[in-house]
Image (cartoon, helix red, strand yellow):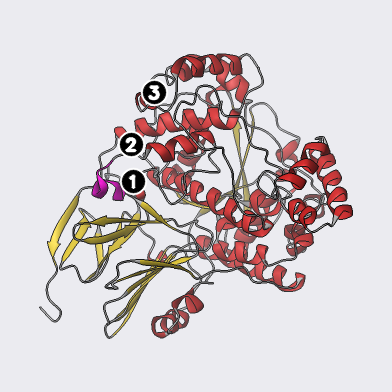
């Protein structure tokens, strides 16, 4: 059996004279070094050279050869390459000794860098880079993640000494002043028609470059995944996979999936039973990732689904993840309405949102009036008694502008979702989340807020943009089914296993107190009111720490770079 090699890429800053490169990687360029690790589709690994100038696009990208050639010589790389559909990183090396690395606008292709004695090394995997910085986890990041996974410590990664490159920024290497990072992306405003057209183009092209020429599967559940499945079916036969409780053949997602009849779309149904409950054990070890993956508590279910995809000879799987974040986000605009004195609109929208979610409007109105956008729709959760490490009060964003809060939130979720991509990669499946593409975010946030948000219509921008593609029943659908086993039940059935995680690595790091955490686990298993996000983050982080502990670290080598012109 072929040994698995994680799929990632990276490079060195120019001018060092020493190239620090990972053992086993394939060099695309030597000076400065640019490499890829693992198996890559040729269409997702494109390079172009003209004299001493070189450009590389790493990841699914809709750019044509002519567009690559233009970006190679264009004075402003971001203006030429920043809005190509897909999820990728663009790297350009000039003959003058400068390297530009373009981070995507949404953060779906995260980038990190490490300062070494031989200069800066950057890459798409913080875990792979971590040995260059000592290989230690960042306990402050982990504590903040456990407290509120949507507000981890800023300007840090899960690994000490490994720094993230901000989404929507350009990393420039080779300057005597060292690496610099500058924002290249900013929100633009479009009319409703222009924004809808941009979304159609971005999502459609993002799906096409992933499925064209390969056998692929998609999730087939709610409106988001259904839209992706229908777009994918335009480029060849696609298998839509619908998860459902074992023994339940109708209702919920099943009813909508069975009613969806379109050329090029086949159906497959995946029944879930007790083996797939949250926290269930599995013989397949959890792979190491850059940070705890959101699906870690349901790894038994997730790994089996991906395993069936891989065994069926379909190495590509598309999800609808990110659709809720884009089109069903918290009504953060209420804080802006209150701040500008638009009281009638604020009260009307607050009432509508509260009716939609079956919640009291009081806390929502108070949050809008007092807290700006920070906690509207997502109130600050109490700090659990078992969290011992000092963590500042969780604040999902400090932005007062609703669009800034929206972009910050989506980037956090997109970065976290990349760990899911790494899990799937370890099983031989290329997992793609087209809704997290930078051009999709750019299109959505450019629309007037009333087009994106409605307390009376479900995901109006998505429905209106793809109204000709979605069947009427799907256009009128207001929610997707909840088919995964209840977390209370999963914890109750698998309680001994979960209790065994309470006094291990997190406790040794001084982040959690085992006894209070054990009590919280027992209470949750009995059905008590539980702050689930923190509890799930603690379980996921403990299992992640075990995975990285049991996974060999990337081995690095230092090689002298021959002088320019040497043979």
Taking depth in this image into account, of 517 and 65 the one nearest to the observer is 517
Q: Quick check: marks 1 and 2 in contact, CB under 8 Å?
A: yes
Q: Which residues are magenta?
A: 127-135
Taking depth in this image into account, of 129 and 333 the one nearest to the observer is 333
Name the residue carrying label 3. 507
Task: Say which element carries label 3.
Answer: helix
Distance from disc 1 to disc 2, alpha carbons, whole Å, reads: 8 Å
Q: Is residue 337 left or right of residue 509?
A: right
Q: Earlier in the sequence, mark 1 or mark 2?
A: 1
Name the residue carrying label 2. 548
Residue 448 among magenta residues: no
Total count of labels: 3
The residue positioned 50% from the left and 71% from the top of the image is: 184
Above or below: residue 144 compared with residue 471: above
In the rendering, at what x and y percent does residue 452 appear? 74, 59
Where does the C terminus fall, quadrant-wise? bottom left
Q: Earlier in the sequence, mark 2 or mark 3?
A: 3
Above or below: residue 312 compared with residue 105: above
Name the residue carrying label 1. 127
Using the rendered view, name the quadrant where residue 256 is placed. top right
Distance from disc 3 to disc 1, alpha carbons, whole Å, reads: 22 Å
Task: Say which element carries label 2.
Answer: helix
Binning the other alpha carbons within 10 Å of mark 2 as few (below 14), some (14 to 19) or many (20 upward) gives: some
Q: Is residue 224 left or right of residue 500?
A: right
Distance from disc 2 to disc 3, alpha carbons, whole Å, reads: 17 Å
């Amino acid at each position: 059996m072929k040994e698995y090699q994680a799929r990632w890429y990276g490079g060195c800053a120019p001018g060092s004279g020493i190239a620090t490169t990972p053992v086993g990687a394939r060099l695309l360029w030597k000076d400065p070094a640019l490499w890829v690790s693992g198996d890559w589709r040729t269409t997702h690994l494109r390079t172009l050279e003209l004299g001493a100038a070189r450009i590389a696009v790493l990841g699914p990208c809709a750019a044509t050869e002519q567009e690559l050639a233009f970006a190679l010589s264009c004075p402003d790389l971001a203006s030429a390459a920043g809005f190509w559909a897909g999820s990728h990183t663009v790297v350009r090396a000039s003959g003058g000794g400068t390297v530009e690395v373009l981070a995507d606008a949404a953060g779906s292709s995260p980038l990190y860098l490490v300062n070494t004695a031989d200069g800066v090394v950057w890459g798409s995997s913080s875990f792979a880079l971590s040995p260059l910085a000592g290989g230690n986890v960042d306990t402050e990041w982990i504590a903040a993640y456990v407290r509120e996974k949507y507000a981890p410590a800023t300007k840090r990664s899960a690994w000490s000494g490994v720094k993230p490159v901000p989404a929507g920024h350009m990393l420039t290497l080779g300057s005597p002043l060292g690496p610099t990072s500058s924002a290249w992306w900013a929100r633009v405003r479009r009319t409703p028609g222009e924004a809808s057209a941009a979304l159609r183009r971005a999502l459609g092209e993002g799906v096409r470059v992933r499925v064209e020429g390969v056998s692929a599967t998609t999730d087939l559940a709610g409106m988001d995944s259904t839209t992706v499945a229908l777009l994918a079916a335009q480029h060849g036969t696609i298998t839509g996979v619908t998860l459902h409780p074992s023994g339940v053949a109708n209702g919920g997602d099943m009813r909508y999936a069975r009613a969806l009849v379109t050329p090029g779309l086949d159906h497959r149904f995946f029944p879930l039973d007790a083996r797939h409950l949250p926290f269930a054990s599995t013989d397949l070890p959890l792979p190491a990732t850059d940070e705890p993956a959101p699906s870690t508590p349901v790894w038994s279910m997730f790994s089996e689904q991906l395993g069936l995809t891989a065994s069926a000879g379909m190495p590509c799987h598309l999800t609808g993840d990110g659709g809720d974040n884009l089109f069903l986000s918290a009504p953060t605009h209420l804080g802006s309405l209150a701040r500008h004195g638009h009281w009638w609109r604020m009260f009307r929208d607050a009432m509508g949102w509260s009716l939609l979610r079956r919640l009291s409007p009081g806390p929502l109105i108070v949050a809008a009036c007092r807290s700006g956008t920070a906690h509207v729709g997502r109130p600050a959760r109490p700090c659990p008694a078992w969290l011992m490490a000092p963590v500042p009060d969780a604040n999902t964003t400090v932005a007062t502008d609703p669009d800034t809060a929206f972009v910050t939130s989506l980037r956090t979720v997109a970065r976290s979702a990349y760990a899911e991509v790494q899990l799937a990669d370890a099983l031989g499946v290329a997992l793609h989340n087209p809704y997290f593409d930078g051009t999709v975010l750019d299109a959505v946030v450019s629309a007037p807020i009333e087009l994106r948000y409605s307390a009376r219509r479900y995901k109006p921008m998505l429905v209106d943009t793809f109204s000709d593609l979605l069947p009427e029943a799907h256009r009128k659908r207001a929610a997707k089914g909840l088919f995964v086993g209840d977390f209370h039940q999963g914890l109750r059935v698998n309680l001994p296993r979960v209790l065994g995680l309470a006094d291990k690595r997190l406790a040794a790091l001084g982040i959690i107190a085992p006894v209070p955490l054990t009590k919280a686990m027992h209470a949750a298993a009995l059905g008590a009111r539980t702050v689930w996000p923190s509890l799930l983050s603690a379980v996921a982080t403990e299992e992640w720490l075990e995975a990285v502990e049991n996974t060999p670290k990337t081995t690095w080598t230092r090689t002298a770079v021959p002088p320019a012109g040497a043979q």
